[in-house]
Image (cartoon, rainbow, N blue to C red):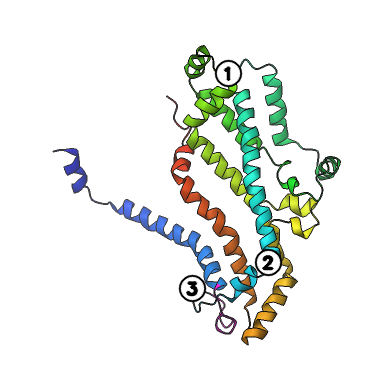
Amino acid sequence: MNQSHIRRKRSWSSFDIAVCILLTLLSLITFFPFYNVLIISFAKFDVISRFNLYLLPLSFDLSAYKVILSDAKFWSSTFNTVFVTVFGVLFSMTISVAGAYALSKKGMPGRNAMLTLILFTMFFNGGLIPFYLIIKALGLVNSIYVMIIPAAMNTFYLIIMKNYFGTLPESLEESAKLDGANDLYILFKIVLPISAPFIATFGLFYAVERWNEWWYALIFISDSTKTPLQIYLRDTLITNNSLLNTLAQQMANDNSGKVYPPALQMATIVITCVPILMVYPFLQKHFSKGIMVGSIKG
């Protein structure tokens, strides 16, 4: 009896069915908050305000999205976040890959001392006030680059990259050096091409971090034209952005209707999350391979 015939005759056990049901329930529980946010973002004031639990879409109204998209501050915040994400990822990946590749070489002078100092920063820091004084001395206060430079390198990512580069066959570099290649040529022409899934994975990690950046902006940026999208979302959810309320009132006067306040908040969440979610499908192939790097040695 061949393998294909055995697979056709295999039936599902009660344990398999129980696991599938459990995973399905967990998936629905995980998905429901996103679904709830989405249907509230399309809610009409006079329809959904009578309900406390939103299981079914009760209306389809784009007023909340129109209010947000007509806000100039939203567009400036979006531009700031895109700038920080694009240039932040390029800067972070450049110094992380270069640093990890250099530290993966056992013959590098001062390698152990550098690794010790890098690991030290994972467990200890000087505190917020000394950190603020350093940022001020560097002239990064109220600068958009404060969201790029101080958080440029994630120490944990650096260590993982170093360990990965250390597992690459030394024969690759030795044969390249025999042909006259230098270290930069080897890194960019040999190491990075064969490490595409690995690089794409950490590029995605850095992109998510930069897209969700808000802490440095909250502490160091007071100019509203330089704040990122996450600060705009925070203002909408917590401080009830007065400009959005004004725009909503103008639309209510023009259209003889009201804009549901929670719909404004949920629409902001949707618009904030969608762009970074759209990036994942393009990196999914590399991401699936990259997260397995180092799990099996051979």
**Is residue 19 part of the magenta span, yes or no?**
no
The amino acid type of the residue labelled 1 equals Asn
Labels 2 and 1: the sequence-earlier one: 1
Q: Residue at x 43, y 60 (%)?
A: 25
Q: Are marks 2 and 1 in contact (CB under 8 Å)?
A: no
Quarter of the image holding residue 64? Answer: bottom right
Residue 294 seen in the current view: no
Farthest bottom residue in view: 256
The amino acid type of the residue labelled 3 equals Leu
| Relative horizontal placement of residue 219, taking residue 154 as reference (left or right) | right
State the separation of the CA atoms marked 3 and 1: 61 Å
Q: Residue at x 75, y 55 (%)?
A: 226
Residue 191 locus on image (x, y percent): 51, 27
- The residue carrying mark 2 is 237
Farthest left residue in view: 1
Closer to the camera in the image, 16 or 186: 186
**Is residue 48 part of the magenta span, yes or no?**
yes
Front of the two marks 3 and 2: 2
Front of the two marks 3 and 1: 1
Q: Secondary structure at mark 2?
A: helix
